[in-house]
Image (cartoon, helix red, strand yellow):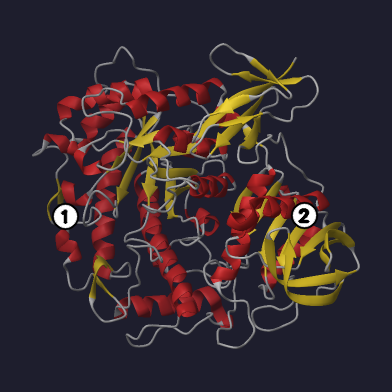
Amino acid sequence: MGSQQGDRHPKARDLPTGPGLGVRGLARCSAGFPYWSLSPSSWGGLLDGVLALRIEAIRLDVPWERHERAPGVFDWGNWRPELALERLLSLARARGLLVWVRPGPWIGPPFPNGGIPSRVLQAEEVRAIGPSGRDLRFPSPTSSRLADEVRHWLRAVVERVAPHAYPLGPVVGLLVGETVPAPAPWPGGGLDYSPQAKGFLTRYLSVKYGEAGPPFAPVEGSSTPAPLTREIERVEAGEVARRLTVGWAAEIRSEVHPGLPLVAEIADHPQGSGGDPVASRSLCDGITLIPPRDGALDYTGLRLLGLRAAGLAPGTGVGAIAATRSTEGGGAALDLATSTAVLAMSGVRALDLRSVVNVREEAGFDAPLEPTGELSETGLRLQELLRLLDAIDHSNLERRADCMLLSNRENGRLREGRSACGSLPPGLGSARALGLLRVVPGPGDGLDLPELDHDIVFDALFDGLRRAGISFVVSEASLSEEALEAARVIFLVSFQRMSRPLAQRLFEWVDRGGTLVVGPRVPEWDWAGGSLGLRLPVQLKDRFGSVRLRNLVLEEAEVFAGGEPVIETEDGVLAVAMPFGGGRIVRFGFRFPFDAVERDAEAVAWIVTRLAHAAEIGARYPTSDPCVETELHESPVRRFLFLANPLPVDRSISVALAPGEALREVRGRAEHVRAGEQFVVPSATVLVRELVRL
């Protein structure tokens, strides 16, 4: 299995060295290379096309079902030349291309079984069982038979590619996801109610929550659980599925090649469903967020995905990027180059295209290369974009983020609390569980439990920050201590209850000098009903069912006395700022209507602007048209402004520049645009301009 050098190609480049490798080897751009669907005679020409695109790395999805010739016996090109994985690695090495290996076991499309052999799925002791008692189409992640099969497959792949690991070869790491589709509300997700799964989940919860007990009782029988219980179960079962596979891969990696980086793929979604990437970070060296097939198909979804990734570790990436089908405001498609630019603008340094080659099995997704090796129209646009990102050294720029929008989904989907509660069962790997969270379900108890309440306020704040031109990042409630300390201002969606660990972390951070913008309520109790004991220098003066602000009807509005007024209407003060220890709290006491942005986008932006000004932050390089967004990226010596027009029509704008500043084209005629001068941002496009002093 030794590495073969292969003939050096005229266009080849040396394998890069230095700190940009390892997990950062995915930096700038990589793309899937479906070798098993391509003639081996075409590999060389297609890899030359990858070089022409300026893509640094290819991702090899290694499908178990294609390589298995008999149970436990694998074909590495001895029978079918299109499966000669090591020959492909040698061709990549000769061209200076890096390689990420993705062994699954769940690969997903284009394989009907996700890449898992049918014989494994059909085994009775492997099949998952739904709440109705019927077999599901995917396996149970807790099956001991499946565990043995997956371990054998992962070991075979790791042993095959280990001799080609960097620096002797091109392989810079492994990408590992779930054994099965992550349990989730979107299509393809589901819960396993097989006896072994229920038993395993019960043991997992007893360790995770310890004496505090889980936030719900494990499901008995096959009846459908209550909606709240079901949503919590999705998260717990999803963590089990991910931790099992990543734990197995980490175990095999440590035995075969301890230095080979391991990156976990986390299913993400604009609504925040799926796994907690911060919690999974302890299992591996990096994270790649993977949107479901319909999870980030518009501009808003891409921005949210990108901002979430930008708030994680520098090695974090976004994978499975394909051309989108629609955008907010008109249905015009965002092509692959624009989607990639939106993510780069959002601060993502690691971008991974679904496929570099447009083959029949990938139909419906744009790819930059044709099967002939020629650049497609998509490829030409992407080539120019990657050239531009190289020219500004994008992976080494810091994106300016003045505040953080925190998604707090304690009531079901994300648990917070960093306290360790003991070692996990051996099958779950070496990571320690997150702290406890008590949820008290039940009708009529007055708790703000519905996820919908959180989503409506979060979406309004997200769109308001965008339209107000305020730079921000999105993170989960389990953000690291380092990320928390780096934040100046945090926007937090909160209601009456919060776990004690999260409340303690946040309010201690405020006491040390941070500014917390919180609403519609400040939490008063923990999930077990105990008082959090927060004493704020503000009093509730009155409460209204609704208050009109311009064309916006704010719901369940509270009017305050005391503190510094931030938002005032004829009904009274709806938001106040107050000192809290060494920092301050900005509190708003109202809920946005469901379609707040559609009703009055300017009013939403005005509200968020007032809240942000109270936290001493404002817009950075706003445009004359609030629909065109800007993001500032900078190094110690250069600054670049990304400008995005998500709408299906061109927009003519000017940018509020400082005296003596101008915008200059990075490539082309290097024309300057000064303060007050108009220029056009084409529809569904992201532009990049350098900020210079005249």
Question: How far apart are the alpha carbons under marks 1 and 2?
Answer: 60 Å
Task: Look at mark 2 in the image and give the residue it sits on.
Answer: 611
User: Are circles 1 and 2 on residues that touch, CB within 8 Å?
Assistant: no
Q: Which mark is residue 43?
A: none
Q: Quadrant of residue 567?
A: bottom right
**Residue at the spot 46% in from the left edge and 68% down from the top edge:** 235
Judge whether 298 appears above or below 148 on screen: above
Q: Secondary structure at mark 2?
A: helix
Q: Residues within 10 Å of mark 1 (few under 14, many from 20)?
A: few
Task: Look at mark 1 in the image and give the residue it sits on.
Answer: 72
**Residue at the spot 47% in from the left edge and 51% down from the top edge:** 284
Q: How far from the left and from the top, in percent, is residue 335?
A: 40, 36
Circle nearer the N terminus (1, 2): 1
- Tell me if 612 is positioned left or right of 128 in this view: right
Q: Quadrant of residue 656?
A: top right
Q: Quadrant of the N terminus?
A: top left
Q: Quadrant of the C terminus?
A: top right
Q: Secondary structure at mark 1?
A: loop
Q: Residues within 10 Å of mark 2 (few under 14, many from 20)?
A: many
Can residue 369 be seen from the camera position used here? yes
Q: How far from the left and from the top, in percent, is residue 368?
A: 33, 30
- Tell me if 281 is positioned left or right of 68 in this view: right
